[in-house]
Image: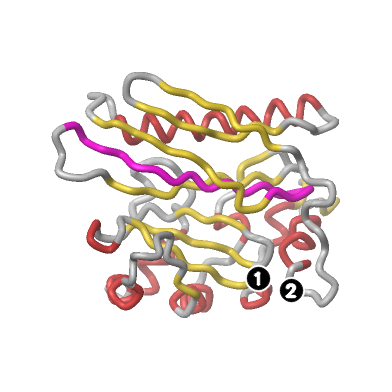
Amino acid sequence: MKVIGVILLIVLLSACSSNKQDLSAAAPVINKVSFSNQQAAIHYPEIMNLNNSEQAKKLNEILKRDAVQIIDYFSGNEQLNEVNTDYVSKLTGENLISVAYSGSSHVKGGAYPRSFLITTNLELTKEKKIVLKDIVRIDEEFIELFRGAKYVPYDSELIVEAEVREELSSYSNEQLIALFNESDVISDANELGVFTYFTKDSLGISFNVLHALGDHAEFEIAYSEFKDHLLTTAFEEK
């Protein structure tokens, strides 16, 4: 069995070492692509400079699919919603790309728009989208790490950390394990709206909260805190 996913482990843990690797040294170039119709306006990334054109095509198809799926998910079959979103590249590395879409969905005639955060994470060598359960062993120990993670407000005016943690406390560890196992999927199966992203030194986890608390909340856990939970075998070539 040839392990190629070890590359991802190196990417994640390099930020924890004293000699940090420059993740942008051979990073892909990202171009912004836009799509709009009567209800939606969305910007999404396109990878430009990979030597393997077939690899680039496959990865770009995944990126476009997720972008279109955001529109479909929030617009719904009855096309009652207006959707606007843009993206931020959380990490653009040689082996890993992490994209976060932030935007709003507004039901026509509704009192207020709903904010959301949706992410797409790509492992370039395997040419695939990865989700939290591919990367991390989701058990009670990991959930406890998450409960103690750093709260990261996406709006400086959202001073609601205590309220968000109180809402989080209403879920048992067993419930969060089940909900995290459905993360990173743009569908109703992802009941809590859990989406993850990568930075140079941390794993970010976003989940839905009450509108008064900002609609979604984000926490970040340093890679060094959960390196024993990384599932490198999830990236082995069978």
Badge count: 2
Identify the amino acid type marked 2. Answer: Cys
**Residue 102: x percent and y percent?**
44, 46
Say which mark, if any, is on residue 16.
Answer: 2
Tell whether 136 sits left or right of 217: right
Residue 78 lies, with reference to residue 116, above or below; the image says above
Q: Earlier in the sequence, mark 2 or mark 1?
A: 2
Q: CA distance from mark 2 to mark 1?
A: 7 Å
Residue under circle 1? 223
Tell whether 219 sits left or right of 108: right
Instruction: Report the magenta residues as a range.
Output: 92-108
Identify the amino acid type marked 1. Answer: Tyr
Residue at screen point 40% across, 60% down: 155
Tell whether 222 sits left or right of 207: right
Residue at screen point 34% across, 42% down: 104
Instruction: Say which quarter of the image contains residue 228.
Output: bottom right
Residue at screen point 28% across, 46% down: 114
Q: Is residue 74 visible?
A: yes
**Residue 166: x percent and y percent?**
29, 76
Instruction: Say which quarter of the image contains residue 134.
Output: bottom right
Residues at marks 2 and 1 touching, judged by CB atoms closer than 8 Å: yes
Q: Is residue 1 visible?
A: no
Residue 99 lies, with reference to residue 179, above or below; the image says above
Residue at screen point 85% across, 72% down: 19
Residue 39 lies, with reference to residue 237, above or below; the image says above
**Residue 203: x percent and y percent?**
58, 64
**Residue 195: x percent and y percent?**
47, 53
Q: Secondary structure at mark 1?
A: helix
